[in-house]
Structures are given as structure tokens and as C-alpha cells.
Image (tube, rainbow, N blue to C red):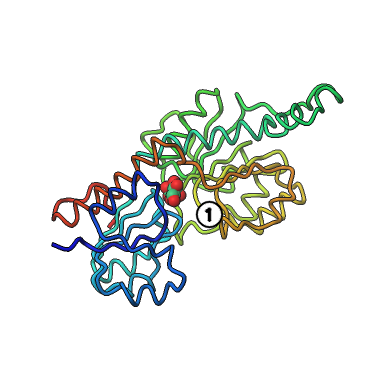
Amino acid sequence: MSKVEILQVGPYPEWDQVPLDAAFTMHRYFEAADKAAFLAEVGGNIRGIATRGELGANRAMIEALPKLEVISVYGVGYDAVDLAACRERGIRVTNTPDVLTADVADLGVAMMLCLSRGMIGAEAWVKDGSWAAKGLYPLKNRVHGRRAGVLGLGRIGFEVAKRLAGFDMQISYSDVSAKDYAPDWTFVADAVELARNVDFLFVTLAASAATRHIVGREVIEALGPEGMVINISRASNIDEEALLAALEAKTLGSAALDVFEGEPALNPRFLKLDNVLLQPHHASGTFETRKAMGKLVRDNLTAHFAGQPLLTPVL
Ligand code: 8YV
């Protein structure tokens, strides 16, 4: 009996690729030189898509697959999947929530600490001989006891806030409504008001058309020259032009970023800044989490084609 044919949009580690190849016929879209020709050649038999959060599946890809039944996303963010196109045809969509929440929150807090205390520069100070030649490393900024805001108190935002509480920080958050699971933290409905009253602003909300550029010029100005923005969500949640202008003019203190428009080809203006910490979309990048994500991708596909309930459905 022939195996179910799957369109694989991006690469997976070997520990995922081997079982996927054993269970399905995997067509590696990302390796095709002529992607349109590739879809025309294999698209007629494809019943599932295995993709990555940042790659998704756009309408053109979905419409090139007349037998498509399910899209399995390796990641919690499914904003790059055209959900409207999926709804029109009853195509199921799954993602990989929960298994990555703690690692993403860990890295967000680590980014805040690393940038606020100048750890990247401090290591250079040791390695380039400055410590011996110039003496003490310049003083940096305290984190504990200061004010933190979390924009989006979903799973990841909640775990970030939990960690910040361990630093005795004053925690407030903005979301569509106050959360009964966050009685100890202050709800602020308006993102500008939130930014005006914190030192560190974490952007943790799920990206969608409704959240695009929610961190715009007004929020950035409100955060101000002593403020730091930390983005572990999607680049689309921040107006990157406004962010760059504020960082260059020093009207925003600093930014710790794990995601970028056009990644991995980020705007070269970021590379000239001395008030940023840049990470390669790596917040979920641990062995344990990525193995759990990959297993969920496989298990959702297997469940669907066995007629079983999906483990982590989005649609
Ligand atoms: C993943 C992410 O690493 O979960 C998401 O949505 O963006 C990251 O955690 C990425 O999707 C893997 O390619």
C-alpha cells in the first residue's frame, strides 16, 4: 500500500526526518529549485503539509494541492498559514503549543538580563584584553525590583511573568481582557499606557492581522529612552521601521529581538546598533523542546490519517 504523500515545506532534524520518511512519502519543497514546477509535479497527490511556524502555508500553496486535508505546523505560531483558505476547504491545522512554552519564556527573560547587564560586551571586555588594559567594565542597569510589562498574557506571556516575579519585579500586562489567572499582576487595557509605565516590555502575543504593528511609534515613544522592548513573538507585532528609527535616535533605550522581518535576512541597520541584542529565532531551540515539537508534528499527521482526533488542533 502506498504511503500518504506529504509536502515538507522546511527542513527538520534527522531525528524527525527519519520517522517521517518511514511513515510518509515526504516531498521536500524547500529543496526544489523550481518550486512552482515542483508543486505542479507532485501537488495532485499531496494530502498533508508539514511546515514550520515561520514558513507556514500560503493560499497559493494550499490551492496547488487539491487533495490537501491537514497542515501540521512545527511551532506554536500559525500566523503564516492562510487559515481562511483552510476554512474554505475544511482543511485541518495543528501546531505545537505547550511543549515549547517554558523554553521560549526562559530565553525571553535571559535576553532581558543579558542586554540589561551588558553581558555580550562584558565577555568582549574580557576576551579583547580591555579588562587588563582599561580596568573595570562600565556599569550597567539593574533588573530586579524594576517594572515589567507583558503584552499578551497567553501561555508564553504567563510563563514570562512568572519568571519575572522571581526577580521581585512590578508586573503589569495588557491583553484583550483581565485574566483571572493573574490576580497578582496589574491589568492595563491600553498598550501605550502599559509601555509608559514599565522599564521592560515583553511582546509575547500571538501574531495575527489584528496584532500587526501593535508595538508602533506611540508604544515605542511611551517606553522611552530608558526602556527595553523584548520580542519573542513575531516581527509583525512590531513596526520595525519605527523601532529602528527610535533605536538609532536613542529615543528607545534598547531592544532584545529573536524575530525579524524577512528573517534570516534581517535589516542591516540592526547590525550597526550598539543598543540591541539579536538572536536567530531560537527561543524554542533546545534539544528537548524541538524533539517534542517534531513528535507532535508526526503524531498529529498520523492521528489525522488514522481517523483519530488531532492532538493539538488549531482548525
Ligand atoms: C519555532 C516559533 O522555533 O513556535 C513558533 O511559532 O516561531 C518557534 O518556536 C519555529 O516555528 C520553528 O521553525
Quadrant holding the N terminus = bottom left
Q: Residues within 10 Å of mark 1 (few under 14, many from 20)?
A: many
Query: Considering only vertical position in the picture, is 247 above or below 123?
Result: below
Query: Which quadrant of the figure contains the C terminus?
Result: bottom left
Task: Count the labels in the image.
Answer: 1
Whether the residue under disc 1 has CB within 8 Å of ligand 1: no
At a point 29% along the width and 45% down the height, the residue shown is 296
Residue in view at x 77 percent, y 51 percent: 249
Q: Which residue is mark 1?
A: 237
* Residue at 26% from the left image edge and 52% from the top image edge: 313
**280 vs 160, nearest the viewer:** 280
Q: Quadrant of residue 90?
A: bottom left
Q: Looking at the picture, how far across and down is residue 69, in whole percent? A: 23, 64
Q: Amino acid at mark 1?
A: Asn
9 and 236: which is toward the camera: 9
Residue 138 in sight here: yes
Left or right, 304 with respect to 188, comes to: left
Which residue is nearer to you in this view: 7 or 148? 7
Looking at the image, residue 243 lies above or below residue 293? below
Residue 9 occupies which quadrant of the picture? Answer: bottom left
Q: Is residue 176 visible?
A: no
Residue 308 is situated, as x and y percent measured from the top left of the image, at 14, 51
Pick the residue in front: 270 or 230.
Answer: 270
Going by the image, does 66 lie left or right of 194? Answer: left
Q: Position of residue 22 (x, y in %)?
A: 25, 52
Residue drawn at x 60%, y 32% is 147
Q: Secondary structure at mark 1?
A: helix
Residue 60: percent from left, percent from top: 39, 74
